């Protein structure tokens, strides 16, 4: 029996519709959520991602603006722009599109964003605060995964969750968020010896390694929930995930496709974080 497909597009649409009501409520109170996106260089993939984010903002009623810099722009130019946006009251969220050119120091750029506007959840404060459960904003991709699990009534508490991948963007925060919901969490990497011995014991398997079709059917526990965060382009131009979807779907209980799985949720949670940032401003105004 094939796995139930976790449709990220459908869930993203539902979440955006729910959160649009919160945007409308803010606008009625005189606050329009605002997002500023900074992009350095002309990387084709980054350009597409930014365009999709701006379109998503428009569809839900969020104000957005894009600040573009040439690939040879200095880090100081970008930092100056961020400082101005930190002071800009109509901007509630600031996002720096990654990757940045090699001559940039990513940590310096990200930590220059005011913590209350760090809607990507990459600031060291928010990353560190995940440990105690006090982050203002959660990183968008793992946040989206948690919402997908919730919307499909996948039990987390008491389950064995295995995260394959240790990046600061997905793997590490994903493990912390699952742990906070009561899962027993194992973190592996693409270099873990006898990886299958870990993945076959996972009730929830989250894969984010950037290696096409790395996880095969024999590495999956029957009935497990499989979340594929990877997105890879094959020689024939087709997209695939880090999981061999066709074989895995015959073993798993739930599985996300690529494309159409986690991807749509990442942008959706960026919108949600921006709305939260605006609501925090509205709350502070109400307390004055």
Image (cartoon, rainbow, N blue to C red):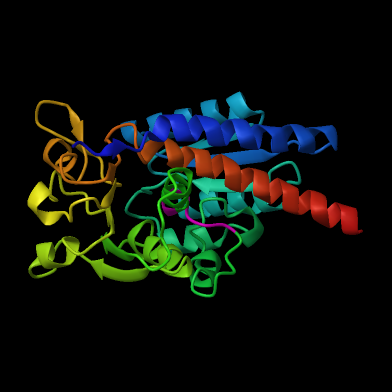
Front one among 135 and 196: 196
Measured along the vertical axis of the image, is residue 26 above or below residue 59?
below
Residue at x-position 48% and y-position 66%: 127
For the magenta stretch, what is the residue range?
137-142
Residue at x-position 40% and y-position 35%: 8
Left or right of residue 122, residue 227 in this image: left
Front one among 250 and 18: 250
Front one among 279 and 84: 279
Q: Residue 205: give x, y in percent of width and height.
A: 27, 56
Dividing the image into 4 quarters, which one contains the C terminus?
A: bottom right
- Tally of numbered tags: 0
Residue at x-position 39% and y-position 56%: 104
Residue farthest to the front?
A: 1
Q: Residue 107: give x, y in percent of width and height.
A: 44, 63
The image quadrant of residue 36 is top right
Left or right of residue 197, residue 44 in this image: right
Q: Residue 122: give x, y in percent of width and height.
A: 48, 58
Dividing the image into 4 quarters, which one contains the N terminus?
A: top left
Residue at x-position 7% and y-position 68%: 194
The image quadrant of residue 4 is top left
Q: Residue 23: give x, y in percent of width and height.
A: 71, 35
Measured along the vertical axis of the image, is residue 22 above or below residue 124?
above
User: Residue 49 lies in magenta, yes or no?
Assistant: no
Residue farthest to the bottom?
A: 132
Q: Is residue 43 visible from the viewing direction of this image?
A: no
């Amino acid at each position: 029996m094939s796995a139930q497909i976790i449709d990220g597009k459908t869930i993203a649409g539902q979440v955006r519709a729910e959160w649009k009501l919160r945007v409308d409520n803010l606008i009625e109170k005189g606050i329009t959520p605002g997002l500023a996106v900074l992009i350095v260089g002309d990387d084709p993939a980054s350009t597409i991602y930014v365009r999709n984010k701006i379109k998503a903002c428009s569809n839900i009623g969020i104000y957005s603006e894009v600040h573009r810099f040439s690939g040879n722009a200095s880090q100081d130019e970008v930092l100056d722009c961020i400082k101005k946006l930190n002071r800009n009251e109509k901007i509630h969220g600031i996002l720096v599109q990654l990757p940045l050119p090699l001559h940039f120091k990513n940590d310096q750029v990200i930590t220059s964003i005011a913590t209350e506007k760090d809607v990507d959840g990459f600031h060291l404060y928010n990353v560190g605060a995940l440990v105690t459960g006090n982050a203002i904003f959660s990183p968008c991709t793992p946040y989206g995964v948690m919402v997908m699990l919730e919307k499909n009534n996948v039990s987390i508490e008491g389950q064995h969750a295995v995260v394959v991948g240790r990046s600061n963007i997905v793997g590490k925060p994903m493990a912390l968020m699952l742990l906070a919901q009561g899962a027993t969490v194992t973190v592996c990497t693409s270099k873990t010896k006898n990886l299958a011995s870990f993945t076959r014991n996972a009730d929830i398997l989250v894969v984010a390694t950037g290696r096409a079709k790395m996880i095969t059917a024999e590495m999956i526990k029957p009935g497990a929930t499989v979340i594929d965060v990877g997105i890879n382009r094959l020689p024939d131009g087709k997209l695939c995930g880090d999981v061999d979807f066709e074989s895995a779907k015959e073993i798993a209980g739930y599985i996300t496709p690529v494309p159409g799985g986690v991807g749509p949720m990442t942008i959706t949670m960026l919108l949600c974080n921006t709305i939260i940032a605006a609501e925090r401003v509205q709350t502070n105004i109400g307390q004055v």
